């Protein structure tokens, strides 16, 4: 794969920030405050420190072994094709828990826009899912300009809220965790906050695109993550200071509630509309991405060939239908089980973290010298974060074991010799 070396540090900072700013900005600050209270500030700092070595490992892997397959390809280089395909299945398993969270967040903002009660959020989630499937069937891809526009709008909104909401005074809410209970709540929030940094694997595609990677990439990575953490911390402080957090629905609508409290009802409605559009477009693209993953697996005969068909627009329509069905079942389960969104978020975090951890273990085999030390630190970072996510990691391990079992049985069936005719 050929990479054009065109990026400088400023463009790299913008790309890093774009990677990590999205729908998480609309719920994670309030959720972390609801979990950890005045200690949420430290949960964010801890998460950023844990993420840095993992991000650098992905950047180095991308520059050394460029591949569109990313993490699965790196793992396959060391552990073989069976492991590579199992990681692909693990990525796909995220469909069971991840999109439902983002769709419910989008629906919560739509509820503000329509001025309806909490009881309507589930119906609005179903309507939103249908709209996203139509969006995906149309084959509309996310554009770089749209991503940059989203980031600029959200950054501008946070800056405005920081000015109007008296951010310097909001620093008064920060407290240092002093006892085991304080730290326990901080660690729980850290396990949830990790959602913000899902997408670290994108770093693998950036490292080889810099004009001077050894100089520019560290600046871009550190600068981009600093901007992201700064934006989230500002919202954490403002939400805690102005008390726009609480139950699940309040946390989902927290930014719009903060806008309404500081700027007025009209601005709250306008922000809710913008937030819904942003969430709708972002999640719609993710659904299309999952559909293309299903289509790819069908092309490889890992799934029935029925899902390998494309429509006239070149969109895997049958795969989109499959993704929509799984997401619908996930939404129904979330509604009927009354599981908190936090559980779905942490199971998603666990699946991504397991993939990141396997990639960092792979780096131990592929890196040498000081780079291997970085890989060791990254592996330890993954283990530490896994301890914060706790039992929700079981989802990831179960999915990986099922994927490995499936690949083993599938391969055994393929290579089983036919019986000689009598």
Image (cartoon, rainbow, N blue to C red):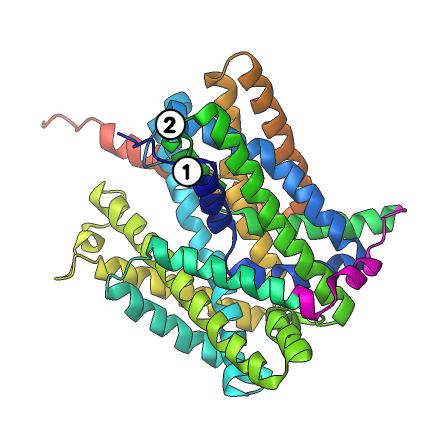
Q: Which residues are magenta?
A: 162-179
Quadrant for the C terminus in the image: top left
Q: Is residue 341 visible?
A: yes
**Residue holding disc 2:** 76
Give coordinates of residue 139: x percent, y percent: 24, 61
Q: Residue 202 appears at what percent x and percent y?
A: 43, 41
Q: Is residue 283 above or below residue 256?
A: above
Tell me the element at label 2.
helix
The reply to whether the C-beta atoms of the residues labelled 2 and 1 are less than 8 Å apart is yes
- Residue 213: give x, y in percent of width and height: 44, 26
Judge from the rendering whether residue 392 lies leftward or rightward of residue 182; answer left or right.
left
Disc 1 secondary structure class: helix
Residue labelled with disc 1: 87
What residue occupies the far top of the structure in this picture? Answer: 369
Side of 34 relative to 121 (left or right): right
Which residue is at the front of the view, 377 or 118?
Answer: 377
Q: Are there few (<14), some (14-19), or many (20+) residues within 10 Å of tag 1?
A: many
Question: Which residue corresponds to the image point at 85% horizontal and 49% vertical from the top-left?
Answer: 176
């Amino acid at each position: 794969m050929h990479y054009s070396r065109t990026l400088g540090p400023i463009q790299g900072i913008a790309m890093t920030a774009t990677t990590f700013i999205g729908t998480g900005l609309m719920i994670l600050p309030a959720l972390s405050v609801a979990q950890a209270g005045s200690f949420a500030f430290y949960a964010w700092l801890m998460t950023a420190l844990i993420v840095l070595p993992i991000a650098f490992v992905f950047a180095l892997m991308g520059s050394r072994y460029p591949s569109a397959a990313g993490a699965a390809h790196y793992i396959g280089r060391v552990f073989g094709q069976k492991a590579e395909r199992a990681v692909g299945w693990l990525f796909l398993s995220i469909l069971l828990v991840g999109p439902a969270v983002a769709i419910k967040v989008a629906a919560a903002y739509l509820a503000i826009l329509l001025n309806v009660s909490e009881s309507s959020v589930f119906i609005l989630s179903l309507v939103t899912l249908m709209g996203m499937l139509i969006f995906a069937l149309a084959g509309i891809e996310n554009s770089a300009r749209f991503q940059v526009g989203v980031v600029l709008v959200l950054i501008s909104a946070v800056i405005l809220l920081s000015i109007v909401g008296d951010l310097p005074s909001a620093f008064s809410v920060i407290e240092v965790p002093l006892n085991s209970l304080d730290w326990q709540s901080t660690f729980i929030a850290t396990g949830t906050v990790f959602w913000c940094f899902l997408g670290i694997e994108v770093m693998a595609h950036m490292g080889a695109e810099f004009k001077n990677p050894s100089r520019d990439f560290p600046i871009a990575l550190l600068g981009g993550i600093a901007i992201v953490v700064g934006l989230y911390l500002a919202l954490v402080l403002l939400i805690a200071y102005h008390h726009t957090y609480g139950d699940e629905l309040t946390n989902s609508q927290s930014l719009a509630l903060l806008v309404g409290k500081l700027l007025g009802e009209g601005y709250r409605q306008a922000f809710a509309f913008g937030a819904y559009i942003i969430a709708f477009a972002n999640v719609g693209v993710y659904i299309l991405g999952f559909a293309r993953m299903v289509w790819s697996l069908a092309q490889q005969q890992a799934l029935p060939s029925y899902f390998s068909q494309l429509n006239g627009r070149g969109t895997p329509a049958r795969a989109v239908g499959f993704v929509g069905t799984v997401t619908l079942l996930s939404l129904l389960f979330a509604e009927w089980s009354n599981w908190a969104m936090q559980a779905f978020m942490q199971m998603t975090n666990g699946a991504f973290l397991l993939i990141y951890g396997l990639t960092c273990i792979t780096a131990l085999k592929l890196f040498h010298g000081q780079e291997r030390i970085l890989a060791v630190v990254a592996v330890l970072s993954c283990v530490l974060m896994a301890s914060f996510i706790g039992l929700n990691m079981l989802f990831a391990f179960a999915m990986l074991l099922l994927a490995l079992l499936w690949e083993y049985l599938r391969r055994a069936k393929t290579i089983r010799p036919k019986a000689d005719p009598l």
